[in-house]
Image: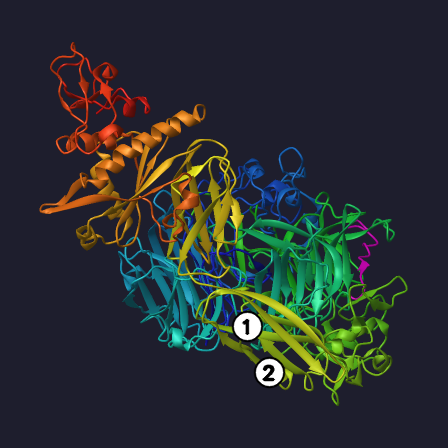
Amino acid sequence: MIAALTPGNAKAEITCASCPSPVQLHLERLELGLRTGPTEEPSAPKFKELGVADQNAGVDEDQETGVASVEDLSPFPQDVSSDGVRTEGDTPGRSGESNRASVEEEREPLMGEGASALRRARRSGAEFAEFGQSRWTGRTGAEAGGAPEDGQKPGRSDLGWNRDEGRGNTRQDEPKIASSTFSLTGDSAHNHAVVYWSGQNSSVILILTKLYDFHIGSVTESTLWRSTDYGSTYDRMNDKVGSKTVLSYLYVCPTNKRKIMVLTDPEFESSVLISSDEGESYQKYRLTFYVLSLLFHHTEEDWALAYSHDQKLYSSVDFGRKWQLIHELTLLHISYVTCRAQMCTEANRNYPFPGYIDISSLVVQDDYIFIQVPTSGRATYYVSYKRDSFIQIKLPKYSLPKDLHIVSTDEKQVFAAVQEWNQNDTYNLYLSDTRGIYFTLAMENVKTTRGIGGNQILQPVMYVYVHQVAGIKGMLIANKREDNQVKTFITYNKGRDWRLLQAPATDLDGNDIHCILPFCSLHLQLQTSENPYLSGTISTKSSAPGIIVATGNIGAELSYNNVGMFISSDAGNSWRQIFEEEHNVWFLDKGGALVAVKQPSVPTRHLWVSFDEGRQWIQHSFSSVPLFVDGVLVEAGAENQIMTFFGHFSHRSEWQLIKIDYKSIFSRKCIEEDYQTWHLHNQGEPCVMGQKQIYMKRRPGNYCMLGKDYSRILSAESCICRAHDFECDYGYERRGDGNCRPAFWFNPSTVSRSCSQGQNYLNSTGYRKVVLNNCTKGVKEMYTARKQQCPNRPPKGLLVTTKNGKLTANLGSNITFLVHLDEGDSLRTNIQLDFGDGTAVSYSNLSWTEEGIKHVYKSAGIFRVTALAENTLGYDTTTLFLHVTCPVEHVQLVAPFVVIRNKEVNITAVVLPSHSRTVTYFWWLGNNTEPVITLDGSISYTFANEGMHTITVQVAAASTILQDTKIVAVKEFFKSLLLSFSPNLDEFNPDIPEWRQDVGRVIKKALLQEQLLVAVFPGVPTAAELFLLPHKNQSEGKKKSEEELEQASGVIVSALNQNLVEFELKPGVRVIVYNTQLTLAPLVDSSPRHSSSAMLMLLSVVFLGLAVFLIYKFKRKIPWINIYAEVNQEKEQEMIGSVGQGDSTPKITLSELDDLFLCVGDKSHPANTQNECVQIQSPDLFKLLNLNCIC
């Protein structure tokens, strides 16, 4: 089974302490289990990285690791000799904090279960100042020791002698440790390496070194090394994998570590090499994709998932020999999907969570799955416990979280750090019930920082300064901000009670330390190393309960100056200082011994071992030449005691692997007399988490070996329950008197809302037992929730929602409604649901609606969905308004062609298919800068100014937006004529706008003046309208202008009535234009055709030249008008019409025709004799239009 986050375009995130780096496919730790996948190399050398690894992997348990370096290392220190004689700086001690700063020039992702990529770092102190993140702590800025000037903490000389050096016991009779050094000859130019050692009684170590070229962004050289004797010697394996094969990554199966995958660099070839014998032999298989991340199944050794660079997910059930495509990035949203690995078709996919979730918000950890859902701008979180259905996480009502970080899930509950609405650089620590649903506050204002995550894309990672002490359940150490100071607190009952740490009584010299609580205490740096092969600033181990080693300081607050190393042997009750300077400390021999090495920024050839929990340290040499230690592997699962140091002697040297066999430091195996008992306690209180626990420890000074069968816990006895064994329940807050009271927003009676008459429910007392607390009797009965009979109540808090949480749905889709009732007898309450479209359903009780109520709407619109809950004691109703939409396919703007100024006009948008109030209309009218927004497809508007005005309407429905635009002429007055055409035109009318535009161009080519508008209407029979407009802004002299328009219309009507207007549509098809009706202005008020909703205008702007065109074309057929070529204008004569006009025919003299011409040819002044001009004997017609010449 796989569970996947199918990605798309969204954004939000839940983070977790043990989650993979952000670059990893967020399938890690799903039902496939372990994280193993490295990712692509960085594209530019901007950072150096010392180490990134699975944070769940133990430091010295079954481990694989990587060692890597970067070029441009600082020169070998001049004060380090080459003859094996110890020089200054070879002892543990304080070094300049600048040397601990991270200089990560190459980001490498996770390299397998416990695998890591360690890198060489610049050794020059000055070079560290410009970087912010700690080399092995992950701290940033001042926390990494930065001084205000340059980020470097002033300290003693890195290589200077310090008194920690004198604390090592170097007696001649001390046993010597055996060590051997192997150089990876020929790989000095390689700047990256991956090292694997299973640690499970296997003597095989694999190392992959490679040269990464930052300029081309790929690996150009590689060497695979293999050792079969725990690292004493190595063999070059290039001949086994192909001498020209360039390898990029090494993977080891977590459930069968004899099985190994090695990937080639895709710049050369895309292949995978598979070995089933711990890398002794390989088989090569071609890949059709480039692996970005790899994930193995947690039980099936041959099952794996691969995520490619092009965002495709593949699965394999034969350990990478064949791959099947499971999913491609095709979604616009993010969904949580589960399916069988080899049957992940759409039909076989399950969607356990309805609706969409935020990207990068899927966290699968132990028994819990967490997701984040966007809800009205707020983050809403859901949890699934043991793969059950998702339930919304219940945080205090007004926490209003901005961010949520999963700290831990390994103690049968969830520890979460929540950044609330009023927090910036702090988080509140919450802990949940067993199911991970109800969260209560454990500590406010926990310190957090953000650093750079361990991956090549350098995404920010949050560090929460909370440490769970391994080996002792319920014990945590946290850094809290109080009054602008950061202080360290400790709890023994999972945050129920906190206290400061008691500082050591004396310093290293035995001098008294006057540090009095609460004004002075011990403060610890709680940053766990990103690299598990460097110990970080605090170390605890489950096999060594009670031992805590940490970096810290003594004072009023946490400081990064004057720090030292401190240890507690009694679970934080008392502390001792062990070094003045920072060290890496590891646990050996089941925690029976400690080994310390100076921080890796300076070379060393010594290590220190303690057998008495840090009271005394014995110095041992492991190298004749000081080594820059990049990482240490501590083997813990076998009888042979072996450590492996990785590093280099100088920036030019080969990779050095030093095998250390520390068995010789133990004199014998421990016997019963070598042990003593230790009682776990909290400041003298023997009951911790409800029980008295007794452990066995080796007596100080006994150099015996504990062995693998050693067990720490001797006995555990339950205690009588007391108040500190109980924390406040959800919805309750601890008051000043120590009692838990309901928060102002919480109504305790709502807990019984799902109960029915005759059933029982648990009525909270305001307290709940701390999870994993083993106390018994005492106050347990008083504080435990009481079983009570469910009361019979009227319905209250009825709520109806859609399953996906949305208030919109597509027409024809299957919509699922969910009905929720806060209070009332769910088994005896009738539920009715009216869908708002004339249909309704009824159920006898709420249980019938658990799977949801499905319905399909057959029409678009806004529907009022009403739910009614009713029983014998009352009823409750609720309403939901659902928008059922379908995409808009067409919009047509219907508006008059000409309107009267200052007179209201109706404008309509016709939408297809028709929608019922589910469309939003945006009207852009005239020169308005903002639209008028309506839900109706019609709007009334008044134009105040004459001229040509643009109207635009945008229609938005669902995710579709369409637009249409029209131009309207605004005049003080106008005349219009309705035109019709001979029937043969209808045969060629497809009734589309383009056709009407083309027909209009027949006239438009010759008639270009703006005083005439011609519009062809949509529909059949074909019709049009001709508008006669006054000259621009002729508001004055309105009466005269009206008379002139009347005269012009008479000229045109006469031509139309005599069938003198025609045009050729196509060869052999001539169309005659007729006059239908003369209308009075304004046309918008009198023409029935204008109000038609189907009218689509073809607008052609002309001068009254249409009349001129008609007169010129039909000059022989109009008896009262003569048009002839100009020959001589010197003689005046009177022209009188002769056919049927009688006295009504205008009498026009040639003296009225001065400078009035119709020019045929190029545009020019009439004086240009090259133009062929004709004289017009209708001067009044032209004068009223102020026309001199039309071309």
Label 1 residue SS = loop
Where is residue 289? Give x, y as percent.
32, 61
Q: Is residue 856 above or below residue 940?
A: below
Is 1019 part of what is drawn in magenta? no
> Which kind of residue does numbered mark 2 sit on?
Ser
Q: Is residue 982 visible?
A: yes
In front of the other: 814 or 700: 814
Where is residue 887? Give x, y as percent.
41, 60
CB contact under 8 Å: marks 1 and 2: no
Q: Nearer the viewer, mark 1 or mark 2?
A: 2
> Which kind of residue does numbered mark 1 sit on?
Gly
Point 26% across, 50% down: residue: 1022
Is 506 part of what is drawn in magenta? yes
In front of the other: 127 or 604: 127
Q: Is residue 413 above or below residue 1067?
A: below
State the residue position of label 2: 842
Q: State which region is magenta.
A: 496-510
In this rendering, would 306 be left or right of 611? left
Q: Residue furthest bottom?
A: 758
Magenta: main secondary structure equals loop
State the residue position of label 1: 637
According to the image, what is the colour scheme of the structure? rainbow
